[in-house]
């Protein structure tokens, strides 16, 4: 029977090497994401036939696996799936692969017995934008965004600061305030998001991420963190701001892209989780494309 290991910070080189071979487009498939959310999802990993196999055993939902990462040579994927299925069965679980990108469904063609076992997951699908669009906000469709930024610049004195170790305590204060406004202690989703973001901040120097802090009238009011997901796409892991500061979210989005991601063709701003307000906000930036994701059930 295969054995799984918990994820720790020293596993980053292992994850990076295998995930690079997968050339991911899905926002979840970075070591940063797996590390910062490891306690919430109870992530574990093992290597089967030179494929990195990651599973999740969250409290709220059933266990699931991610698509194995690596170079798919010969029958390695079939063997990995077979051994994962055996492991899941030993626990009384049904094997499901979640967050599978549409382009990678073909890898399961010889494994899945019915098209009914492939289910579109709209709520987990990622919004991907042209970095040029997010930087320049050109055209009538971005009139509202430009107006928000112009109003912000008129109302406030501001400072954009590339995020360094010396700024992390200020980010923690922003997170604490954000959490207090949402009563995180009684809302598990917000509470776990705070814990995940705190994990990233504690290990920021080891993650290879880039970030930014915005000061408004001398006070730290917003911060954001992201990294390159693949050779042409950046992914934004965190974006937190004081919602009472008019236009601040729009401003930090545009400034972060301009200052840190101008070399990327695209920016992945993750999923909307089926939250109506979040979906409306993400659509308002007019995504260039979606990373459609699926659940694949192995019977």
Image (cartoon, helix red, strand yellow):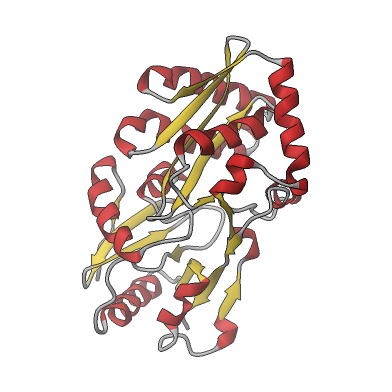
Count the marks: 0
Can residue 2 be seen here? The reply is: yes
Tell me which corner region of the image, top left, top right, bottom left or bottom right, holds residue 128: bottom right
Residue beneath the point at 68% across and 30% down: 182
| Residue in the foreground of this view, choosing between 215 and 205 | 215
In the rendered view, does 14 fall on the left or right side of 196?
left
Query: Percent from the top left, x then y, of residue 68?
Result: 35, 68
Horizontal arrangement in the rendering, residue 85 relative to residue 279 (left or right): left
Q: Residue at x 74, y 31 (%)?
A: 148
- State the residue lying farthest toward the top: 218
Q: Is residue 68 above or below residue 177?
A: below
Residue ID at (52%, 36%):
258
Is 130 located above or below residue 114 in the figure? above
Task: Please state if 294 lies on the left or on the right of 67 as rendered.
Answer: right
Residue drawn where x is 62% and y is 28% of the image: 241
Decide if residue 94 is in sight here.
no
Residue 92 or 30: which is nearer the viewer?
30
**Residue 32 quadrant:** top left
Q: Work out which residue is located at the far front of the displayed protein and give it.
A: 139
Where is residue 27 shown, x and y percent of the image? 48, 54
7 over 125 or under it: above or below: above
Residue 197: x percent and y percent?
48, 35
Quarter of the picture containing the N terminus is bottom left
Give residue 262's position: percent from left, percent from top. 47, 42
């Amino acid at each position: 029977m295969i054995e799984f290991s918990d994820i720790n910070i020293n596993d980053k080189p292992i994850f990076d090497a295998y995930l690079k071979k997968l050339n991911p487009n899905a926002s979840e498939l970075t070591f940063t994401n797996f590390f910062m959310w490891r306690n919430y999802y109870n992530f574990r990993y093992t290597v089967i036939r030179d494929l990195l196999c990651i599973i999740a055993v969250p409290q709220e939902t059933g266990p699931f696996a991610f698509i194995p990462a690596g170079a798919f040579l010969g029958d390695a994927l079939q063997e990995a799936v077979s051994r994962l299925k055996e492991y899941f069965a030993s626990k009384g679980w049904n094997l499901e692969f979640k967050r599978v990108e549409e382009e990678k469904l073909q890898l399961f063609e010889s494994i899945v017995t019915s098209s009914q076992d492939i289910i579109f997951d709209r709520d987990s699908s990622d919004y991907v934008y042209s970095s040029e669009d997010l930087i320049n906000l050109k055209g009538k469709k971005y009139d509202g965004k430009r107006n928000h930024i112009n109003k912000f610049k008129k109302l406030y004195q501001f400072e954009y600061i590339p995020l360094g170790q010396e700024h992390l305590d200020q980010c923690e204060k922003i997170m604490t305030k954000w959490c207090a406004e949402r009563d995180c202690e009684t809302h598990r989703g917000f509470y776990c998001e705070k814990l995940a973001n705190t994990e990233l901040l504690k290990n920021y120097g080891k993650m290879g991420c880039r970030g930014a802090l915005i000061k408004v009238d001398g006070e730290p009011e917003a911060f954001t963190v992201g990294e390159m997901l693949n050779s042409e796409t950046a992914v934004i892991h965190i974006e937190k701001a004081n919602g009472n500061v008019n236009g601040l979210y729009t401003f930090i989005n545009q400034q972060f892209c301009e200052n840190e991601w101008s070399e990327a063709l695209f920016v992945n701003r993750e999923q909307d989780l089926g939250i109506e307000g979040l979906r409306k906000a993400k659509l308002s930036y007019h995504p260039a494309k979606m990373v459609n994701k699926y659940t694949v059930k192995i019977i």
